[in-house]
Image: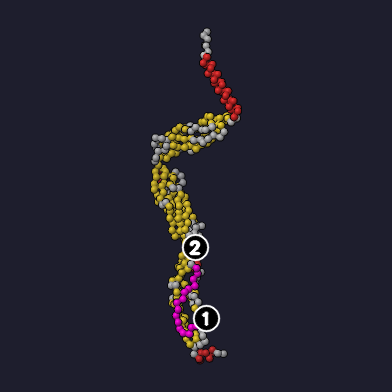
Amino acid sequence: MQTEKKNPKTRGLKLISFLMALLLWFYVVNLGELDARQTIREVELTYYNLAEGLIVDGPASVEIKMWGSFGEPGEIIAYVDLDGLGPGDYKIQVNLSPVQGAMFTTVEPNRVEVELRELRQDYTVISYEIRQNPPPGYELVEVILEPQQCIVQGEQALVEQVASVVAPLNLSNIQNVVAFRVKLEARDGAGRLIEQGIRILPEDITVYAALERKRGVKAVAVTSNLTGELEAGFQIKEVVLDPMEVILLGDEARLQPLETITLQALDLSSETETFSRRMGLQLPEGVNAYPAEVLVVVTIERVSEEETEEDVP
């Protein structure tokens, strides 16, 4: 029988291995930080080096298993390298960057199925749509969109369905001039919302909206406003207004209740003969009139002695 002689070098290596294991055991016992249990994390899957003009369709996340972690593990990065790949279907390995604080890691699945498709992008003019009207008494004067164009990206068949990109406006709580952000919406030819499979760049825009009170126009009759008493022996024979009607312009809510408009007061106490005078109008705030003045002709005549005697009881 042949006897195998033990190599002294082999005995030395075993001794060194034993000593290293012993030192590791002492390290673990003294620090008390090594956790031998399994830790599972769901991590977002990142796609690197996607060629220009392509979009990727694949899993959004993978599962990472870790053993022997020292304290809390650092940032975990799982990724797929798409370098040099064109349109088509692929089964690609998932790579995992070294996880600080973990002795051993695995990723499931370790290979993922991805599809690379050609990307189409179209420039589209943005329009706006009023969803909520302005407050009562206000009207929209001007809308400016910034920017006025956007890019619609996605699979060709889906991008071709986009008939318009719309900025929906809620004006219910807006007065005067304001700026606000609005998220854009893509619509097909029937006006239906397209939410999946496309991307709008930018996703939202700035809207500048100018509102003012509604302006109305209304024709109303003019009434005179004579004050004071004529001297004894005189009387008013006739009062003529020219024009007898004026056009009012202003806030629609203020114009609505007006049926007549009154002249400024005209004092007759010192008048003894026929006269004419241009008088302004008593206008509500925010209302203008055309013309702004009315010619008032007051015909005054002397009362005869017979008429005066007839008036005496």
Q: Quick check: 123 above or below 235?
A: above
Q: Label 1: which residue? A: 228
Which mark's residue is nearer the viewer, 1 or 2? 1
Q: Which residues are magenta?
A: 269-285
Write the residue at 51% across / 31% down.
106
Q: Position of residue 157 (x, y in %)?
A: 40, 44
Residue for point 54% across, 20% down: 16
Residue 105 to residue 3: above or below? below
Q: Position of residue 162 (x, y in %)?
A: 41, 48
Residue 121 spot, x, y in % from top left: 39, 45
- When asked about the image quadrant of residue 73, the answer is top right
Please name the predominant secondary structure of the magenta segment in the image. loop
Q: Vertical placement of 179 versus 70: above or below?
A: below
Residue 189 can be seen in this image = no
What's the CA distance linking mark 1 and mark 2?
40 Å
Query: Residue 249 occupies which quadrant of the picture?
Result: bottom left
Picture disc at residue 137: 2
Residue 213 in view: yes
Element type where label 1 sits in the image: loop
Mark 2: secondary structure: loop
Mark 1 or 2 closer to N-term? 2
Q: Which residue is depicted at the point 43% across and 39% down? A: 56
